[in-house]
């Protein structure tokens, strides 16, 4: 079963091309090919521009390229080579050699998928590609035909007639949490093509999502009845992570190398070949990471590592302080509210005498007790100053929350740096087989 999506690209074509041709996702570029342009993102972008600039109809803010995604079900067990061949055939039949395109097959996730980015200006007559529900249905129809020819499952026709809702409903009923996969894929596709977080919010809106900001970033598609917190999709989808990914599009992500211990040595030739390739990939990424961070000696690494730990500790202290300040102001606001709510009852209690006062106290025990507690709290807290107005306290909380959010972003970034340094540290130990190398 293959599901296709097509999205417009208004700018940053090169950034999108860089993403789909990522060697880590495409078996070192083996699964990347092109038509009427280079497979190099920078050169392809220039070649796209040459064609676009002679378009018959010049339009401002027009779609300069389109991003077609063809995702295969993990249940079909499609091979990378088979998926790539299907993707190339899909591009040929849909675009009919009228448009430049680059196709890349990604194998880094549990489901194999093709990315096809094509210029919307024809190299034949310079006319623009028109995308609508009919062209979308035609693309899905061709994809279904190719899946059938390759003995892969397809989406039922009644599901396939609608571009959005029906497919997602179908997936949601077929596979419990697949709706989350659709949302994650949508977020990922937007993150790679935007420059700012504001652009991200706008692009998600264009995909019919409402994004709620606040204590937690949450998403709601028009077909959903409730919001889904980004963090419930995984750490990659928290606000801190999304902002980090947008601001650091070329970050090298280091992973643990495969150690050829006694257990792994007993495995077959296929595993050893896989391990060797993975470790070479990690070595390449390590070299790039070390160059970017000026790591050229053991002492230099340890200095950077300790500096990062100190930075994280300082940020944690700042976050702790800001959270305490917010809690204190909220406690003061709650105390003022309680004081106001119980003041009349307490004043009446004070004005009474004798048995009548005792009876009133029994009947209003909680209100009187709460009033006395918050009154004492406020008196002790503001012994040398006036109790601030609630409006001022609320303004201070908003300011503190803003500072906390910025600090949280710095904290996430520092933690990502530490994660990369820790991976580098462990991989160096694996290479040198020395567990005592670092202090």
Image (cartoon, rainbow, N blue to C red):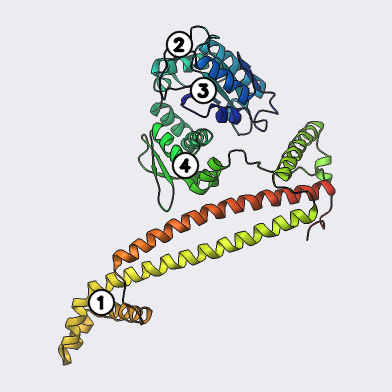
At horizontal 46% and vertical 64% (from top left) the residue drawn is: 323
Q: Residue beneath label 3, please?
A: 68
Residue position marked by numbered label 1 in the rendering: 367
Secondary structure type for disc 3: strand
Give the number of the mark in front: 1 or 2.
2
Q: Mark 4 against mark 1, which lies toward the viewer?
A: 4
State the residue lying farthest toward the bottom. Answer: 354
Which residue lies at the image location 49% right of the left edge and 67% below the top edge?
A: 321
In the picture, the quarter occupied by the C terminus is bottom right
Could you tell which of marks 3 and 4 lies nearer the N-terminus? 3
Q: Is residue 109 toward the left or the right of residue 221 in the image?
A: right
Q: Nearer the viewer, mark 3 or mark 4?
A: 4
The one nearer the camera, 169 or 14, is 14
Residue 127 image label: 2
Res 39 visible: yes
Q: CA distance from mark 2 to mark 4?
A: 33 Å
Q: Earlier in the sequence, mark 2 or mark 4?
A: 2
Asked which secondary structure carries label 1, the reply is: helix
Question: Where's residue 148, x and y in %?
Answer: 55, 15
Label 4 crowd (10 A; few <14 / some 14-19 / many >=20): some
Q: In the rendered view, would you say 267 is above or below 318? A: above
Find the distance from the CA under tag 2 to the CA under tag 3: 19 Å
Q: Earlier in the sequence, mark 4 or mark 1?
A: 4
Q: CA distance from mark 4 to mark 1?
A: 47 Å
Secondary structure of the residue carrying tag 4 is helix
As rendered, which of 52 and 111 lies closer to the eye? 52
Residue to which mark 4 is pinned: 197
User: Which residue is found at the position 58% from the left and 21% from the top?
Assistant: 46
Q: Can you tell which of label 1 and label 3 is closer to the viewer?
A: 3
Q: Alpha carbon of mark 1 to alpha carbon of mark 2: how far?
A: 76 Å
């Amino acid at each position: 079963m293959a599901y296709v999506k097509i999205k417009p690209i208004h700018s940053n074509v090169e950034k999108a091309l860089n993403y789909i041709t990522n060697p880590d996702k495409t078996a070192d570029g083996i699964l990347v090919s092109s038509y009427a342009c280079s497979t190099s993102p920078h050169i392809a972008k220039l070649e796209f521009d040459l064609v676009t600039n002679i378009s018959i109809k010049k339009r401002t803010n027009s779609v300069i390229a389109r991003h077609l995604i063809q995702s295969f079900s993990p249940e079909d067990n499609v091979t990378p080579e088979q998926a790539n061949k299907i993707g190339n055939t899909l591009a040929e039949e849909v675009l009919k050699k009228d448009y430049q395109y680059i196709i890349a097959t990604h194998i880094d996730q549990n489901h194999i998928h093709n990315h096809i980015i094509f210029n919307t200006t024809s190299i034949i007559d310079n006319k623009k590609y028109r995308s609508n529900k009919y062209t979308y249905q035609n693309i899905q129809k061709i994809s279904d035909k190719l899946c059938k020819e390759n003995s892969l499952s397809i989406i039922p026709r009644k599901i396939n007639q609608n571009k959005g809702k029906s497919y997602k409903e179908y997936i949601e009923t077929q596979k419990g949490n697949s709706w989350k996969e659709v949302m994650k894929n949508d977020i990922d596709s937007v993150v790679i093509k935007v420059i700012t977080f504001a652009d991200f919010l706008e692009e998600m809106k264009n995909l019919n999502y409402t994004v709620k900001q606040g204590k937690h970033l949450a998403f709601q598609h028009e077909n959903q009845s409730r919001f889904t917190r980004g963090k419930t999709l995984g750490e990659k989808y928290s606000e801190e992570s999304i902002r980090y990914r947008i601001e650091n599009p070329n970050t090298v992500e280091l992973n643990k190398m495969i150690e050829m211990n006694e257990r792994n040595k007993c495995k077959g030739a296929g595993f050893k070949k896989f391990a060797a390739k993975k470790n070479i990939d990690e070595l390449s990424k390590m070299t790039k990471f070390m160059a970017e961070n000026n790591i050229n000696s053991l002492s230099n690494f340890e200095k950077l590592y300790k500096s990062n730990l100190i930075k994280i500790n300082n940020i944690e202290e700042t976050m702790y302080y800001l959270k305490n300040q917010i809690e204190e102001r909220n406690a003061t606001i709650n105390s003022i509210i309680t004081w106001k709510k119980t003041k009349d009852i307490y004043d009446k209690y004070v004005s009474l005498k004798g048995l009548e006062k005792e009876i009133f106290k029994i009947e209003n025990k909680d209100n009187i007790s709460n009033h006395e507690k918050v009154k004492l709290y406020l008196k002790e807290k503001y012994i040398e100053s006036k109790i601030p107005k609630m409006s001022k306290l609320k303004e201070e909380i908003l300011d503190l929350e803003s500072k906390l959010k910025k600090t949280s972003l710095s904290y996430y970034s520092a933690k990502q740096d530490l994660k990369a340094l820790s991976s580098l540290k462990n991989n160096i130990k694996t290479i040198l087989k020395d567990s005592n190398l670092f202090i």
